[in-house]
Image (spheres, helix red, strand yellow):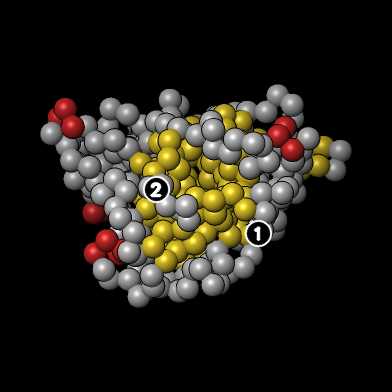
Amino acid sequence: MIMVLYSNGLLLLQMLLAVSCAGKKGEKSTALDTHPISVTKSSANSNLLFEETFENDAPFSAAHGKEIGDWDYALQYVTSPVFKGRKAARFEIRADQALVKDGKRAEVTIVGPVTSKERWYSFAVYFPSDGFAKDTVREIISQWYQRADQHLGEKSSSPATALRVNKDRFVLDTGFNANLVSDGVTPESKKKLDLGEVTKDTWHEFVFHFVHSFHEDGLIEVWHNGNKILTHAAGNMYNNAVMPKWKLGLYKAAFKNGTSAVTNRVVYFDNIKVGNEHATYAEMAPSAETTAQK
């Protein structure tokens, strides 16, 4: 349930979420077309667990880990284009590069396995027309990845939920599996949710509100450029010992198997945030002024 309150001319959002597995059946996925949401400044006592604006001397120093290989082009900090401030992060992968953890990737794990079911995630992302030509095969730019339960004999599989680009469209792949040992999401739970066109040479703002769960109390809400575009009520992870960790960057399986028509991928990220269960859209929006920018 979402309550919208007006106070002193500013729009505040308060999320009231009541979840229960008992008595629920099926799933609900709703695409919304609303007017842009006004953004206010984050308070000094914000609910941010992680924030990277690239305005400091040690970018990603607080990130959980990096999977970028040994190439200078894989991850760079640049002054153009930027979303806000002076710098942004540039990621690149190439079809002829060596494998990084058995894949063609350049990714940063922003936070390790979360410790609470409810979390907020946000970022701004930019796709240059000269570095992100339309392709017929997809890639991942954001994923919520879980470690397999190897002690139970489970093998690694694709993330249950990931934001992909497919033929110049944003697509949220999501599903779940409640079995203790699995080899992927169950076919009946697998969804490919179209989130709109990947326009080039412009910044896109994304905010995700998750209730991580392999039950029917799972929830994903998505805002794009200030508009709420999706409410998806369903499971979104595996029944594993550890919960998902969040990764940003580039991963393209087609570069490994040789089925891509392009030879490189470039994207830029800025204003990356993770919020706790008490966070609000006003705090999480990439365009909101935060403590690091005051």
| Side of 203 relative to 157 (left or right) | right
Q: Residue at x 26, y 42 (%)?
A: 177
Can residue 83 be seen here? The reply is yes
Instruction: Classify mark 1: helix, strand or loop.
Output: loop
Of badges 2 and 1, the one in the foreground is: 2
Q: Quadrant of residue 16?
A: top right
Dot 2: what SS?
loop
Where is residue 232 shown, x and y percent of the image? Answer: 45, 49
Residue under pointer 1: 81
Mark 2 vs mark 1, CA separation in Å: 24 Å
State whether residue 29 appears in this view: no
The mark nearer the N terminus, 2 or 1, is 2
Q: Residue at x 66, y 58 (%)?
A: 80
Image spot of residue 284 (x, y percent): 63, 40
**Residue that appears at 67% across and 28% down:** 46
Q: Position of residue 182 (x, y in %)?
A: 19, 41
Which amino acid type is marked by label 2? Answer: Asp
Say what amino acid the circle numbered 1 marks. Pro
Tell me the number on the disc at residue 119. none
- The spot of residue 7 in percent (x, y) is 82, 37
Residue situated in front as seen by the camera: 107 or 285: 107
Residue that carries the numbered disc 2 in the rendered image: 70
| Nearer to us in this view, 63 or 32 | 63
Which residue is more in the foreground, 66 or 157? 66
* Quarter the N terminus occupies: top right
- Considering the image in quadrants, where does the C terminus appear? top right
User: Within 10 angstroms of label 2, few (less than 14), some, or many (20 or more) residues?
Assistant: few
